[in-house]
Amino acid sequence: MSAALNTEAAPGPAAPLLEVREIEKTFPGVRALSGVSFDVRAGEVHALLGENGAGKSTLIKIVSGVYEPDAGSILVNGAKVEFSTPDDARRVGVATIYQELLLFPELSVAENIFLGHAPLAGAGRIDWRAMRAEAERLLEALEIDDLSPDQIVGALTVGNRQRVEILRALSHNARILIMDEPTAALTESDVTRLFDVVRRLKRRGVGIVYISHRLDEIFAIADRVTVLRDGAFVGAREVAETNAAELVHMMVGRRIDNLFPKTKAEIGAPVLEARDLVRRPLTKGVSLTVKAGEIVGLAGLVGSGRSELAQTLFGMTPAESGEIRLNGEIVRIDSPERARAKGIAYVPEDRGAQGLVRRMSVLHNFSLAALGALSHAGFIDRASERRMALEGVARFSVKTSSVDEVAGRLSGGNQQKIVLGKWLANNPKLLILDEPTRGIDVGAKAEIHRLMSQLAAEGVAILMISSELPEVLGMSDRVLVMREGRLVAEFDRAEATSQAVGTAMMGGASSAGRAA
Amino acid sequence: MTAAAITTAASARGAAFRRLIGQEALLAVAIIVLAIVVGFINPRFLATRNLSDILLGNAYIAIAAVGMSMVIISGNIDISVGALIGVLATVSGSLAVAGVPVIVAWLAALVIGVAVMAAQGAVIAYLRIPSIVVTLGMLSILKGGLISVTGGRWITDLPQNFHLADLSVFGAPMPVIIMVLATVLAALWMRHSPRGRAIYATGGNPEAARLCGVNPRRTVLMVFALHGFFAGLASLVYATQLRVIQSNTPQGLELTIITAAVVGGVSILGGVGTVVGSTLAAILIAEITSALVFINVSPYWTDALRGALILATVIADILRRQRRAAQGWKR
């Protein structure tokens, strides 16, 4: 519709395939992008690098027509374009391959490739023979000989499915291909084959925007790299002229967050001692200790196995082998029920799906984890229940009209305070927090940090997972870094700098061979 | 907390209380207004005889709706209950006719009801098969099985003392006593016990419930077993009112029971509702059905009206939810 190519800027010979200029985008309460510029030339792989929340996803959603920018312009072949739907972007040759592949598992490779634009044989009939031939031609063009157009997509490996998505993009004559963390779920051999495909695409003059957390991949496949931080453009480099240290430095910067001054707590005896915990596929022999009064930050990229480790410690996915001691005593934790009985509390990553029963009242949410303790002879002591919830609301400064309010009507920050607060009725010894402040406003965040400090001061051992490096550095007495299912580094508060932790998270330049 | 904060909390508590009883109060008013209006058009509608017929003839629906409400609140549904009531009535009647002590005949209905529903609950909870599929299968098995086994024969010559529903205590007829007791006890249990609370939590968010130490599977199994008990009670009230037990039940019985639960304020999405509401709704639906006769509307309109009622309730529920969302229902 409004993919109107307008010719005010004449396409010069050196015009990049795709260029974005000074893009701005604000969501309610969040400035996602502030003046980001970026371009891709034909036959080039341009990597986008940045921490979680740096604005990479927002940027590619704007380029692929999912969001409309508040300000700034997009140029394709030097001509200004406006996308109001993903279809507009596709029509001028921009295709996006998301992390979650959008395929139809019951259909064949050829059907998936041509879904929505199948060759027709008149009267609206699909020309199956032409479709199959076209699919063969595409497979040959990318020298893929181990896929056939008739295979059912559901039976393919993730790597092969991804190649089907790439073929689908090519079938739309895509000139610009955006790949969002394409290797996140791939095995090593799949990665090699993906890179082969990417190189062939380059040779055909396709411009590729490549998003990845993995520095080694960027050095292996990209020509240029642009770094974003907090929604802003930090810099662009030729890959040949930079190194891992510089990129990490650009990504994490030197931000000091004084938002949450951590108070010092007395550190006591070990509360949690885990040894050689194994739970396939993402916990590969992890040993760690968390002491009373200590806040241990667990850093790592998404997919490094942090959340999986938390779930194993809490008994959701019990360990296959290894040993867990609580206060020196060996315990077997094979269910959340058991973990709770042993004094472990867990605030999950996904508040909506795992933390809160949004249709129940604040009161009932507060008491849900403590119903056993609140009951006598099979009935809930409603007075104690109400007292407990009122205390929790006061202590955690939950902003609600009353404890009878439906929990789902509160703001995200207040919901999170309830999720955190409901565990404290059980007086946990070990508190595991997975992304405790994701998606909540600054004020609520500071309050949650204040509570963490307070709990630590009371002698609770806290294990905190966070993707925000400033939060990890600001709150932790000790920082553990996880990568590919293992703990790879440990820093004391004094030595934990964003540079050091960031490098350990990325695997730095030392693991350029991509350790499996 | 400051005094002002406590005052606002108290008034908000009042608001929450009003919201909670909203559906029940609305139903109670509807029952009374409808009686007055229809009584105006045709005074015979208000005859004691008619009013007691409405209550006695439909108490079993309200009793079954108690269990159905629990099932729906837990995030499930059961469409086999109508057929099960038919089977239990036949089993109980046949035993009584065969000379088994009536107390055993009555207990058989309860025990088999619990067993059949618990089996379905186990399949739903532990094999994770959607309840609509499991209970649809059971519906066909029970319906087909009943006709095949009985060959469509009617059960007659029931012993005099089989008729539990004919008894009364202090002038109150047994069906009404059972209906009121079942509703009140279930309501108290749902509201005040940890297990009752677990049903709401399971229906509202099974994953969050699990992390809080609630066992959602065991909860679903328990809910179906209880539902089987209420279905057994319902079948007793139903069967012991009849002089002749046929091998079928009123057409669309399960839908009437589901309608009672939903019109009573139970959210079809789970997690919300009360059994007091479902009982009042069962009475209202029975009253509407009877009223149609008294104002000379073809009984064929009953089904259509019941359908309109369920759609109106669900649409009202969804609109309320969307309005809340518009007011800032946050994720």
Image (cartoon, rainbow, N blue to C red):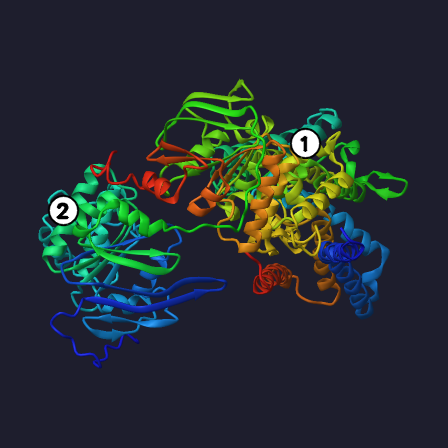
Q: Residues within 10 Å of mark 2 (few under 14, many from 20)?
A: some
* Residue at (23, 68) in percent of width and height: A91
Using residue B254 as the reference point, say whether residue A273 is left or right of it: left
The answer to whether A153 is drawn above or below residue B330 in the figure is above
Question: In terms of secondary structure, where does tag 1 sit?
Answer: helix
Q: Position of residue A73 (x, y in %)?
A: 30, 72
Q: Amino acid at mark 1?
A: Gly
| Residue ID for mark 2 | A196
Using residue B184 as the reference point, say whether residue A406 is left or right of it: left
- The residue furthest front is A494
Front position in the image: A491 or B283:
A491
* Residue at (21, 53) in percent of width and height: A166
Q: Position of residue A494 (x, y in %)?
A: 44, 37
Marks 1 and 2: which is nearer the front?
2
Q: Is residue B151 visible?
A: no
Front position in the image: B231 or A509:
A509
Front position in the image: B77 or B211:
B211
State how many labels appear.
Answer: 2
**Quadrant of image for the N terminus of chain A:** bottom left
Within the image, what quadrant is residue A405 found in?
A: bottom right
Chain of the residue that carries numbered disc 2 in the rendered image: A
* Residue at (10, 44) in percent of width and height: A145
Chain of the residue that carries numbered disc 1 in the rendered image: A
Question: In terms of secondary structure, where does tag 2 sit?
Answer: helix
Q: Amino acid at mark 2?
A: Asp
* Residue at (64, 53) in percent of width and height: A406
| Residue ID for mark 1 | A372
Q: Position of residue A381 (x, y in %)?
A: 76, 37
Are the residues under marks 1 and 2 on the same chain? Answer: yes
